[in-house]
Image (spheres, coloured by chain):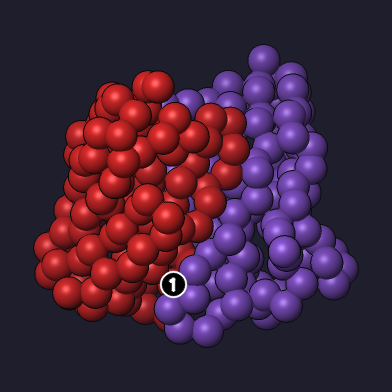
Chain colours: A purple, B red
């Protein structure tokens, strides 16, 4: 069964460092997303990406965040200068882009900023 | 503003003890309501999509129903392996259903 894969599963970084979280969406999907979940809180939308550009972003997704689809299979989230409050689970998701299709999520990357 | 509220926050059941989880939503122009299961430290796993009031969907011991204001996830004769957090979500925005607003979830524990 097709699935969304994310690497690494756990990333520990020093405050102020840059991190790149990687995702391989389901191959025939067209829309890609990043969500995050701070421990004990709701899953929050960060950004959506379609046709090689951002289609929507939340207020959380400020200038320290960026996304890229560097090739035909990978989708990345970069955090330029990490803060303690960036510690969270980050989930990548994808969907087929047809109205009313469900999004499939990866297993997440746990980011710990120390 | 689009909003999703789930209750209860936590639910403990004995194996075989049926119950229901609630998801109340406020959204302009519902384009679907999604149920996901989330195990600790894992990503949300898709369960159901409901599109219109009166619709019902079933999967094993789970049945999801939808009204104009809320959705219920009924769990019949649960087993310990049904223990997880159940998330409800609705799409936001105007063009694609992947941009979801999630509720805070109901954490279900089923004891043998």
In-front residue for pair A13/A10: A10
Q: Residue at x 72, y 64 (%)?
A: A1
Residue A114, percent from left and from top: 67, 15
Q: Helix, strand, or loop for circle 1?
A: loop
Left or right placement of residue B76 versus residue A43 in this view: left
Residue B82, percent from left and from top: 44, 38
In-front residue for pair B75/A72: B75
Quadrant of residue A109 in the image?
Answer: top right
Left or right placement of residue B100 versus residue B42 in this view: left
Q: Residue at x 38, y 68 (%)?
A: B49
The residue singled out by tag 1 in the image is: B97
Residue B27, percent from left and from top: 21, 66
Residue B89, percent from left and from top: 35, 56
Q: Residue at x 27, y 52 (%)?
A: B73
In-front residue for pair B36/A27: B36
Depicted B6 relative to depicted A74: above or below? above
Quadrant of residue B65 in the image?
Answer: bottom left
């Amino acid at each position: 069964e097709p699935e969304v894969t994310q690497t690494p599963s756990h990333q520990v970084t020093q405050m102020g460092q840059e991190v790149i979280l990687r995702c391989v969406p389901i191959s025939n999907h067209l829309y890609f997303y990043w969500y995050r979940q701070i421990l004990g809180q709701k899953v929050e939308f960060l950004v959506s990406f379609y046709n090689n550009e951002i289609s929507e972003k939340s207020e959380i997704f400020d200038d320290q965040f960026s996304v890229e689809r560097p090739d035909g299979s990978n989708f990345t989230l970069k955090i330029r200068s990490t803060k303690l409050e960036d510690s969270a689970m980050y989930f990548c998701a994808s969907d087929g882009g047809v109205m009313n299709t469900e999004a499939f999520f990866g297993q997440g990357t746990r980011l710990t900023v120390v | 503003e689009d909003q999703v509220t789930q209750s209860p926050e936590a639910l403990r059941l004995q194996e075989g003890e049926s119950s229901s989880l609630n998801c109340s939503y406020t959204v302009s122009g519902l384009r679907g309501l999604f149920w996901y299961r989330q195990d600790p430290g894992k990503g949300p796993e898709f369960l159901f999509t409901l599109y219109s009031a009166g619709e019902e969907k079933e999967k094993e011991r789970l049945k999801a129903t939808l009204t104009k204001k809320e959705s219920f996830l009924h769990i019949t004769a649960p087993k310990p392996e049904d223990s997880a957090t159940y998330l409800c979500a609705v799409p936001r925005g105007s063009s694609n259903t992947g941009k979801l607003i999630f509720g805070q979830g109901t954490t279900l524990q089923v004891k043998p």
